[in-house]
Structure formats: C-alpha cells, structure tokens
Image (tube, rainbow, N blue to C red):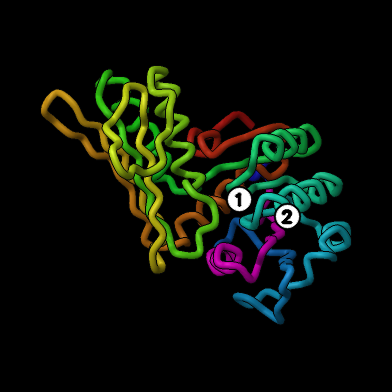
Amino acid sequence: MTAADTEAIQIAVTGATGRMGQTVLETAAPRADVEVAVAVSRSPAERVAGVPVDDAGSLDGLLDAEPVDVLVDFTGPSSALEYASTAASADVGVVTGTTGFDDTERVTLRETATRTPVLWATNFSRGVAALRRAVTAAVAAVPGYDVEVTETHHNGKRDAPSGTATTLLEDIEAARPDLDERVHGRSGHAPREPGEIGVHARRAGDVTGEHEVLLAGNDEALSLSHSAGDRAVFAAGALDAAAWIAGREPGWYDFDDVLDGGAP
C-alpha cells in the first residue's frame, strides 16, 4: 500500500517542542494528506498547534496504541537513532532531517532501513534540491575553477558546517575528484592550494538557512545560492516525504526519490 491508497497518512512527530518539531506540527495542521496521531518531546507540553505533546519516553507505547504510518524526526543524532529504532520495531516508516551524524551513526541509521522504510535528507527544500543539481552541473562544466562553499544559520545551529553544506561538498567532490581537501576558514598566510575547497560556516541571529557555492577562474566568477525564508519550507518537504514513503517496502530512500516520483 502507498500514500495514494489512503486519505490521510498518520504521522508521529518527535522533538515536538523544538524549533522544527513545532514547525512540522503547524505545517501539518491545514493539510489533508497527513494527520498527526502522536507528538512527543523530551520537554512535553500540553499542546502545540492543537496537538497534545507526550513525553518522548512513552513513544514505543504510543506507536503500539495508535495507527501511525510514518515518524517524522528533526532532533539530534543520538535521539534520532533511538526514535528510528523504536519506529522500526513498530513497523512505522521514518523520515528524518536530523544532521550531524558521524560515520558510525550513519551506518546504524542505514541498518534501520533493513527493517522499515527510512528516508533521510539533510535538507527538505525543493529549492535546495534544484541547487544541488545545478551545482553538480556547473562544477563539471568549469574544470579547474576554484570552489568556495559558504553557509549561514541562526546562532543556535549545532553542527558546522551544516548538513546541507556537507551534502553540497559531497556533490562537488563527486563531480570534481581533484578537489579532495576541505579548508575550513582561513587565517594568517593562507594562499589557496591545489585541491582545496574553501568551507565557511557563519552563525548569526535567527537566519533560517543560506547556502552559496562560488566558482571562480578564467577571469570570471559564478555564484549559485539558496536562501530559506521560513522553516516551514523544510517541514512541508518532510511531510511530502512522509506521504510518499508511507506503506513502502523497507529500504533506504532520499528526497530525490520523492521529487522524481520514485517507484511504488
């Protein structure tokens, strides 16, 4: 059974009192294709966007008691892995936009996908998805050009560089194997060396998210950028992903699968 076979996908939201958790609940409220059945947080609240928020420690019992199709998570690496495992044990799919996983944690998350469908993305913006494709094409089209990646986020952002910036760096390195050294900021005597990609992370105010890739060489410069005006754009993409992944076979999925339609 896929999303097309049901009227409204039943979702669980973790981290429901956090920045993104609240936004997911607010964004889900007017939608007809998803309905929040469960919301949990380590700091529970009476209601967020009209939805009661229970203690995160009760998630397993809630998933057993409620007909949940997909869990939507924007928390932290350790909690995201815990919630994903709990969801898998309850035959509930997982959509997570949590970033900051180390290599071991990524492997653990992928192992969860052998038990339930898991869709992980560092960014659920359709604009960022388009940016990634444009950056891959541009980097390949101008071999030898210098590349710099700059990202700006609010002052509470925990991982640096951001997950989106890291994904852009991976895209660039795949298109340009000669760029194999990430240089995080520069100070003192630091001329560019062959093989470098400059990486710059800025943290200020309440900036939702800005990413720029600069390519320069041959007496010209090309800049590709994206700016998010509201966290709701990420929440909407995650809910699109939840509606898409519901009822699918266990496996590892990404946001491109949603954008491209993917196979049922």
Q: Earlier in the sequence, mark 2 or mark 1?
A: 2
Q: In the rendered view, does 155 fall on the left or right side of 263?
A: left
The residue closer to the viewer here, 145 or 123, is: 145
Q: Secondary structure at mark 2?
A: helix
Residue at 67% in and 79% down:
47
Please name the residue that numbered disc 2 is placed on.
79
The amino acid beneath tag 2 is: Ser
Crowding near the residue tagged with mark 2, few <14, some 14–19, many ≥20 C-alpha atoms within 10 Å = some
Residue at 27% in and 37% down:
214
The residues colored magenta run 6-28
Is the residue under label 1 in contact with that under label 2 (CB below 8 Å)?
Answer: yes
In the image, farthest residue toward the bottom: 46
The picture quadrant where one finds residue 64 is bottom right
**In the depicted structure, whether residue 264 falls above or below residue 246:** above
**In the depicted structure, whether residue 220 falls above or below residue 176:** below
Residue at 25% in and 24% down:
145
Magenta span contains residue 149: no
Q: If the image is split into quadrants, where does the C terminus sit? A: top right
Q: If the image is split into quadrants, where does the N terminus sit? A: top right
Residue 6, percent across and down? 68, 50
**In the depicted structure, whether residue 256 falls above or below residue 83:** above
Magenta span contains residue 8: yes
Please name the residue that numbered disc 1 is placed on.
98
The residue closer to the viewer here, 174 or 128, is: 174
Q: Secondary structure at mark 1?
A: loop
